[in-house]
Amino acid sequence: MRKLLYSVLVLALLTSLGCAITNYSVITDTRGDYSGVIRTMHKAYIIPTSQVAKVYADGSDCLFTMVYQNQYADRTLYTFNNFDPTATVKFLDQTYCDWRYEGCEIVRARDPHQDWLDNKFDHEFFKDCSGARSLSILLDQKKRLGECGDRIFSDLQDLSAEFAELPTTSFRGETVYVVPMNSGNTSITLTSGDVATNMPIYGQFTGFLTEELQLVVPMTPNMKLQLGWLANHTNANGEAAHVEITYGSLNGAVDLHLLTEGLNYNSSRF
């Protein structure tokens, strides 16, 4: 578990983790005498395993995804931005499961129940919407995370204990873990098809992680170089990539779909 979580954090720092879910599991429920596929009736907030905010000079972005499912188990996924112009990083609070969101979606993805009809990463990208600058990754979420009011995984406090050995600091009046990444403690290899490429790491990236697994990543100027390198890599080798990460003595791997259009747009906005 610790290897996986470190890998997720390093990957978040690497790409600024502007993530849109474009493929999601069928939503089912058991209530009373009924058990099976449900119709959500409206968009439902997908509870993430963690929240990641990117801090820019003009405010902070924090992307989140909502899902609508009809009676046939066909889903539509919408990715929005929780923008905070003060850059104090006010993470979205879904205590009351509010599905009403005023604003345009950055990504809209159709996810039909019939897998043979579905391209897991097909989507519409609306680059003029708030938060478009932060989008870098399309995610095939094979395992259902749970929706607001129906959390499947509720052990975030247990997960945060995995980071107890990280150094701490004070961030906006709260004690947070410091997650540094540089060429001295991190190496990353991207494999696309038969091509394996070691990624250069441009300078130092530092994230601040709360006990609720909320990650804050300042968008420093060297992120432009990192995003530019990733955009060039996807242009040359394709968007699908198997990523192997070594962080100190830890190792992990993930499969990703890097969004070329989003990477190019991100790097041009710095």
Image: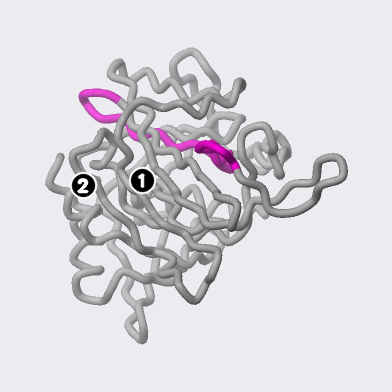
Magenta stretch in the rendered image: 40-59
Q: Is residue 169 above or below residue 76?
A: above
Mark 1 surroundings: few (<14), some (14-19) or many (≥20) residues within 10 A = many
Relative side of 50 to 105, left or right: right
229 left or right of 64 in image: left
Residue 171's x, y, as percent? 45, 20
Above or below for 198 versus 184: below
What percent of the width, then of the height, locates residue 199? 31, 65
Percent position (x, y) of residue 66? 48, 41
Instruction: Give 169 or 27, whichever is nearer the viewer.
Output: 27
25 is higher (above) or lower (below) than 59: below
Say whether residue 140 is magenta. Answer: no
Q: Which residue is mark 2?
A: 266
| Name of the residue lying farthest toward the top | 173
Say whether disc 1 or disc 2 marks the residue closer to the N-terminus. Answer: 1
Question: Closer to the camera, 32 or 191?
Answer: 32
Disc 1 versus disc 2: distance between alpha carbons?
10 Å
Q: Position of residue 158 (x, y in %)?
A: 73, 39
The disc label shown at residue 18, or none: 1
Q: Identify the image quadrant of the N terminus.
A: bottom right
